[in-house]
């Protein structure tokens, strides 16, 4: 799993896809919780890059289901945070905030503060909320928490976490119209990223950062002397950002259902988001197991899916369930 994560970070996406196909089934069955979380997040992120939102959402639904079934609330929260980030990149302000609220389990994040959990080095609730605040809320209000988290990241040697926080602070400064300070912050962050080989950590911050990097690159290259390593790195980033550097978000490709879901079928889907088994559904709905199976068959037929996890992924894409 760390090898797959390293390939992904280097933006070696073909290798990453191959490694995911090889190792994800094994990680699903025998890996430690952090590796389980990481490999499903990599699956989702790789799918987003390919504009395959269905696969991305299904990977997160699978992770959430495994979290519920194996009593791993951290896995559930990780899937919710990643879904919130996808919604944020789509510009869906309220939906992203609602997903962050679902991930707000104080016991999980208190533990993360006490321990260095590999899966949450740069994937934790407070960082996700700061990102949301910078994109949609009050970036000035986010600055103090960013400063505190960044100081803590440096003191504890969490350099990747510090890199993400620097990128977010550059975005916050830019949104507050402190352009020169934003560029200085970005320069420091990208010089470190270039020297250490970080690529996806930067790219995965999406269109808003891409736009700031475009502006920074123009200002940087107007100087009398430039760091050749950073100049090459900037050019490579903008090539990889592609259309997102022009502000194009990742869109879901939706189409109306030929036959709409009934109210009861939407209730079933909503309960599935909580990790309910067939027996749980029968108990909650006060119906027989046979009736539950009928509801599930009808849902799959209408959504053109073949499993409950696929159905949840499609339902979320269509906005039928949170």
Image (tube, helix red, strand yellow):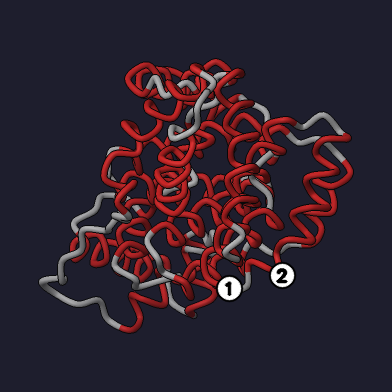
Vertical side of 62 occupied by 126: above or below: below
Q: Is residue 249 found left or right of 150 in the rendered image?
A: left
* Image quarter of residue 31: top right
In the depicted view, which residue is nearer to us: 147 or 31?
147
Label 2 neighbour load within 10 Å: few <14, some 14-19, many 20+: few
Please tell me which residue is depicted at 47% across the width and 18% down the height of the picture.
7
* Residue annotated with mark 2: 141
Task: Say which residue label 1 marks.
Answer: 137
- Asked whether disc 2 touches disc 1, contact meaning CB atoms under 8 Å apart, the reply is yes
Q: Where is residue 6 in the image (x, y as percent from the top left)?
A: 54, 19
> Which element is circle 2 on?
helix
Circle number at residue 148:
none
In the depicted structure, whether residue 14 falls above or below residue 99: above
Q: What element carries label 1?
A: loop
Query: How many labels sit on residues?
Result: 2
The picture places residue 217, in percent across and down from the top left corner, at: 44, 38
Is 217 in front, or is 299?
217
> Extreme left residue here?
258
The reply, left or right, for residue 257 in relation to residue 54 is left
- Give how far apart the Cα atoms at labels 2 and 1 are: 9 Å
**Residue shown at 79%/49% (left/top)?**
149
Most extreme residue toward the front is 224
Binning the other alpha carbons within 10 Å of mark 1 as few (below 14), some (14 to 19) or many (20 upward) gives: some
The image quadrant that residue 138 belongs to is bottom right
Quarter of the image for the N terminus: give it: top right
Q: Is residue 137 above or below residue 72?
A: below
Residue drawn at 55 percent across, 25 percent down: 198
Q: Nearer the viewer, residue 50 or 279?
A: 50
């Amino acid at each position: 799993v760390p090898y797959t994560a390293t390939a992904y970070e280097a933006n070696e996406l073909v290798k990453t896809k191959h490694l995911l196909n090889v190792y994800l089934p094994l990680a699903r069955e025998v890996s430690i919780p952090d590796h389980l979380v990481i490999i499903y997040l990599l699956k989702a992120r790789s799918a987003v890059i390919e504009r395959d939102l269905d696969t991305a959402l299904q990977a997160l639904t699978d992770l959430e289901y495994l979290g519920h079934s194996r009593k791993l609330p951290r896995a559930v929260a990780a899937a919710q945070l990643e879904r919130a980030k996808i919604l944020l990149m789509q510009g869906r302000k309220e939906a992203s905030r609602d997903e962050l609220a679902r991930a707000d389990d104080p016991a999980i994040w208190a533990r993360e503060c006490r321990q260095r959990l590999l899966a949450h080095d740069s994937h934790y609730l407070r960082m996700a909320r700061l990102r949301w605040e910078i994109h949609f809320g009050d970036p000035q209000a986010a600055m103090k928490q960013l400063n505190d988290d960044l100081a803590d990241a440096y003191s504890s040697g969490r350099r990747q976490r510090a890199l993400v926080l620097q990128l977010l602070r550059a975005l916050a400064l830019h949104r507050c119209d402190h352009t020169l300070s934003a560029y200085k912050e970005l320069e420091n962050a990208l010089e470190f990223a270039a020297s250490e080989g970080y690529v996806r950590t930067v790219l995965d911050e999406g269109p808003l950062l891409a736009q700031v990097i475009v502006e920074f690159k123009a200002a940087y290259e107007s100087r009398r002397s430039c760091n050749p390593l950073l100049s090459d790195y900037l050019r490579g980033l903008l090539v990889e950002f592609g259309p997102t550097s022009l502000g194009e978000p990742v869109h879901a490709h939706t189409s109306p259902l030929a036959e709409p879901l009934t109210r009861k079928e939407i209730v079933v889907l909503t309960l599935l988001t909580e990790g309910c088994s067939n027996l749980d559904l029968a108990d909650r709905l006060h119906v027989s197991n046979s009736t539950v199976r009928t509801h599930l068959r009808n849902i799959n037929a209408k959504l053109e899916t073949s499993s409950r996890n696929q159905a949840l992924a499609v339902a979320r894409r269509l906005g039928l369930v949170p």
